[in-house]
Image: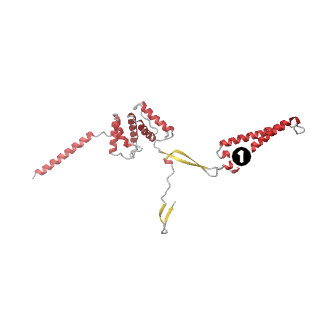
Amino acid sequence: MTTAPVGARRRLGALLVAALVAALGLAATAPPARAATPSGDEELPAELRQRLTAAESAFRVQNYPRVIELLQPLVGHRLLRGRDEHRDVLEWLGVSQYLSGARDAARLVFTKLVQEWPRYHLDELLYPPDLVRFYEERRQDLIDLGVIEPGRDPNVKTRLVLVRELETSDVPTIAYFAPFGVGQFANDEPGKGTAIAVIQGIGLVTTAVTWFAIDGLKDSETGYVARADESKATAFNALWIAGAVLFGGSYVYSVADGLLGRRTEGRATYRYELIDVDELPPAPDLSGLRLGPSREGYGVELSLGF
């Protein structure tokens, strides 16, 4: 029977022709591959590259709703991190949202774009002036807030870190017995120290001036104040006492207040700072940490090896 093999060959040939026609049809209708310049080491999956190509085609014909639909799920995609394709995603998506009237959504996308590429600018010849101005204003806002540094390398990743500073006082005790508010300045109380210094200065100047004034009233031969100048001498003497009391009282107060307000323990201050991730100290090595049953046969044992 020779007809069966011939029929089988015909059916096989028809299947091959149909498969070839289908392949040619798919090749003719498939979107053109994008001339990508990948910045990462691994190749992007075909489905992801096709989505990017379709989004680029829609962006070129100003089909912004289609661009938003294609690119919204790709923001922060793990395979696009650090690649030029992610920058294109954020740019096309932000522009499409802005031109579609979604200003708040565009502001969020542009914020992410500026954070990852702080030195990147939109093409002024390609986009409308109001769009470029909108992007630059958002970029300047982030610079003013200290979120980004326009001069840093965009490949250097930074992290907002809470920094704790412990300030200790090493002022010796004898320093608190110095006049003119030294103890208050040592305790980081410049306002109180300045006030005490001014009061002590007034008292010291008053005693000095009145001392020389009284001495000037004395007779050079007898060393005593003449009867006609006794009233002046009495007034100057009262001023001298007032100046001495003012200086002495403020001095005693400054010494007592300084010693009572002296810091015996460190004072911690907190602030936020943008720090390069590579400069952060490494995490502690807990490879020597062991938690398990006690070697004695009962209880739990915790050990840490260095």
What amino acid is labelled 1 in the image? Answer: Tyr
Could you say which quadrant of the image residue 63 lies in? top left
Give the answer, above or below, for where 43 lies relative to 63.
below
Most distant residue in the bottom direction: 297
Camera-nearest residue between 122 and 96: 96
What residue do we see at 54% from left, 47% from top? 163
The residue positioned 70% from the left and 48% from the top of the image is: 256
Q: Is residue 186 above or below residue 94?
A: below
At a point 35% along the width and 37% down the height, the residue shown is: 65
Q: Nearer the viewer, residue 25 or 304?
A: 304
**Residue 296 as seen in the image, left or right of residue 78:** right
Closer-to-camera residue (175/246): 246
Task: List the single residue furthest toward the right.
Answer: 222
The local secondary structure at tag 1 comes to: helix
Horizontal and vertical percent position of residue 95: 39, 35
- Residue 140 location, x and y as percent? 48, 36
Q: Judge left or right: residue 152 versus residue 261.
A: left
Residue for badge 1: 253
Furthest-left residue in view?
1
What crowding class fits label 1: few (fewer than 14 Cα within 10 Å), some (14-19), or many (20 or more)? some
Residue 52 to residue 1: above or below = above
